[in-house]
Image (spheres, rainbow, N blue to C red):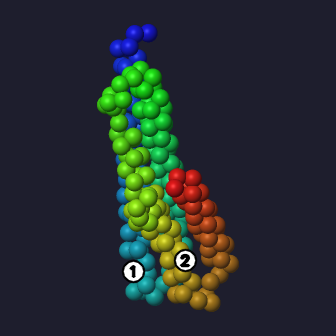
Amino acid sequence: MCLEKKVDLIIAEYNTLRDEISARSNKELISITISISAVSAIIGVISINYIAGYNLSILLIIPWILSFFGYIWLDHSKSISFIGDFIYKEIENKKISTLFTDEKFNYLSWESSLQKEIKDVRKKTLFFWISRKSTFVPLFYFIIPSIFSLIVFFVYNGCKINYIQWIISFVDIYLIIFLIIIWLTRLIKYR
């Protein structure tokens, strides 16, 4: 196969993978948008129930919604990282370097530049961990609000919790723990 066809195949693969990253990034945004809408609607119902003096059992739904969309978000985030690593390791470093021996040839260098920037930032500051979307979004949007809704439910209802609410609460706690485990596994693997 001639050099021109090899380059065309590499560029086509690169573009396809970048399109996949873009599509998954959009799906991450959609999962956050839908969950914000759902939680906002629940908060509206909660405020009406609170004013009317009703039980706030609907708070138990929030961890379900946030866990579900949190799993989706983490899956897309993980896939984006995998694809980015593949572009960096296989396309930019192996395939391009085998075709071109000129070290200055670096037209497909987005992931290489990104990896270099990440390594530089890691060496300089711990702010790197806080600033990463894979750290910030799951913790501050999916995990903490789920825990907070359970705390508010237990504080508000006190001793007036029936066995169905206890069962739902235990499922909520399981979902939150499972989400935390997936999130921490992801952080440890990609630190």
Can residue 2 be seen in the rendering of this structure? yes
Residue 127 coordinates in the image, percent (x, y) = 40, 66
Specify the amino acid type for callout 2: Leu
- Identified at 43% across, 78% down, the residue is 46
Q: Which quadrant of the figure contains the N terminus?
A: top left
What separation in Å lies between label 1 and label 2 (alpha carbons)? Answer: 19 Å
Q: Which residue is depicted at the point 37% across and 20% down?
A: 7
Residue visible at 62% across and 70% down in the picture: 173
As helix, strand or loop, the secondary structure at mark 2 comes to helix
Is 130 left or right of 187, judged from the image as shown? left
Q: Quadrant of residue 106?
A: top left
Classify residue 109 as left or right of residue 191: left
List the residue tagged with mark 2. 150
Q: Is residue 133 above or below residue 55?
A: above
Q: Residue visible at 57% across and 64% down?
A: 180
Q: Residue furthest top?
A: 1
Residue type at numbered disc 1: Ile
Residue nearer the viewer, 72 or 110: 110
**Location of residue 32 (image quadrant):** bottom left
**Residue 152 coordinates in the image, percent (x, y):** 51, 82
Residue 39 position, x and y percent, is 42, 67
Q: Which mark identifies residue 124?
A: none
Mark 2 surroundings: few (<14), some (14-19) or many (≥20) residues within 10 A = many
- In terms of secondary structure, where does tag 1 sit? helix
Q: Is residue 137 visible?
A: no
> Residue 37: x and y, percent?
37, 63
Q: Are marks 1 and 2 in contact (CB under 8 Å)?
A: no
Location of mark 1 (residue): 48
Of the numbered discs 1 and 2, the one sitting upstream in the chain is 1
Q: Nearer the viewer, residue 125 or 175?
A: 125
